[in-house]
Amino acid sequence: MLQCKAAVADGKGSYAIKTIEIDETPMDDEVLVQVKAAGICHTDWDSQSWGKQLVMGHEGSGIVKQVGPKVTSLKPGDAVILNWAIPCYQCFQCQEGNQHICENNSAVAAGNKLSKGHARFEATTLNNTPVERSFSLGTMSEYTLVREAACVKISVEIPYSSAAIISCGVMTGYGSVVNAAKVKAGSSVVVLGTGGVGLNVIQGARIAGSSKIIAIDINPSRLAMAIEYGATHTILADKDDIGLLEAAKKVKTLTVRGADYAFECTAIPSLGAAPLAMVRNAGTAVQVSGIEQEIAIDMNLFEWDKIYINPLYGKARPQIDFPILQELYAKGDLILDKMVTRTYALEELGNAFSDMHKGLNAKGVIIF
């Protein structure tokens, strides 16, 4: 067994850096990856309270060290991005092109059950007891054992820190624009919340050819950052603006009839309906941040013919979308290096979470 350091959540709201053991001989379609970088997001913070012990982390990149006998697309030495929405390619949803909601392997669809996307559960242990890996990855660990379908080969020159963030926030933001909303060139876009996901919605809209990109936030420094990523206009919101209805009036001043598209990226339940107030009749509102709480919506906001969608993970098709994102990065269209505001050692994870909550980083990344 290979011993390595990892951040392990206790399921009760905290974590500790511990030594885990991983079977270093992959079986079947398993791949042993030496993790080089792991992105940090609010989901990782939340995973401390999921009621079970697990190896934290679901964004990452690294180097393939060993492969199982059924692995056909990877070899030792390959650099890879780790993808948490692991497709089986055989189920109804995968056949429909919805690989991000695979019926067999999705950690989200599986709920609290261990998804089939997980490599052997017993192959990762803590004190001789099997321990689950967050989203079948557990990237906040020096090594991880994953399924071949969780790996996408890195095909361009890119730092591991930049590659790591592709596999959640970048894909979610960009994909919500391009795959889910299918934003048209020349259109107007509003982005509510300019954290890591919101910034990727902004640059997704810029890459898609939007002529007007309006960023809304309560943090002036975040709005300044939004301009760097492609926002053409900014609106400093008021914390007391219920449902952002006053901000919506400013949007309509800028767009005449309302925006063509609006994306909610705040993760604040009370703002779940806010994008509907921003769009014109027959416009499209997109709930990006994964709000799962029950909220009340004034149905007048839907008048008239407005569309509201709630895509997961930008409708990612990892083996198709990740290479596209890498090429956009290599071309200079997709900003990634600058997005990694600060890097941390694994032992500094507490500081990383603190900086995240304070809004100091576009994206924080653990470097191994």
Image (cartoon, rainbow, N blue to C red):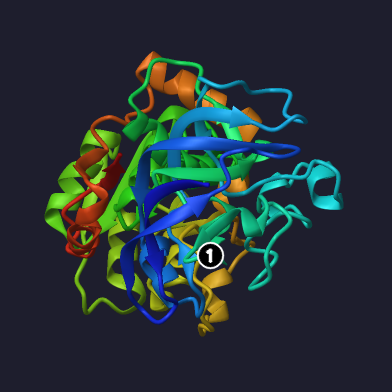
Q: Is residue 291 left or right of residue 27?
A: left
**Depth order, front residue of 293/79:** 79
The residue that appears at 86% across and 44% down in the rendered structure is: 90
**Depth order, front residue of 3/209:** 3
Q: How many marks?
A: 1
The residue that appears at 22% across and 79% down in the rendered structure is: 240
Q: Position of residue 204 (x, y in %)?
A: 44, 36
Residue 66, placed above or below residue 245: above
Task: Say whether residue 254 is visible.
Answer: no
**Depth order, front residue of 32/358:** 32
The residue that appears at 50% across and 23% down in the rendered structure is: 154
Tell me the element at label 1: loop
Q: Which residue is mark 1?
A: 128
Badge 1: residue crowd in 10 Å (few <14, some 14–19, many ≥20): few
Q: Position of residue 220 (x, y in %)?
A: 13, 55
Image quarter where the C terminus lies is top left
Residue 267, placed above or below residue 86: below
Q: Is residue 314 left or right of residue 2?
A: right
Q: Position of residue 276 (x, y in %)?
A: 49, 65
Residue 228, placed above or below residue 87: above
Task: Say whether residue 199 is visible.
Answer: yes
**Depth order, front residue of 204/187:** 204
The residue that appears at 64% across and 59% down in the rendered structure is: 122
Q: Position of residue 360 (x, y in %)?
A: 16, 54
Question: Looking at numbered disc 1 in the image, what kind of residue is underneath it?
Answer: Asn
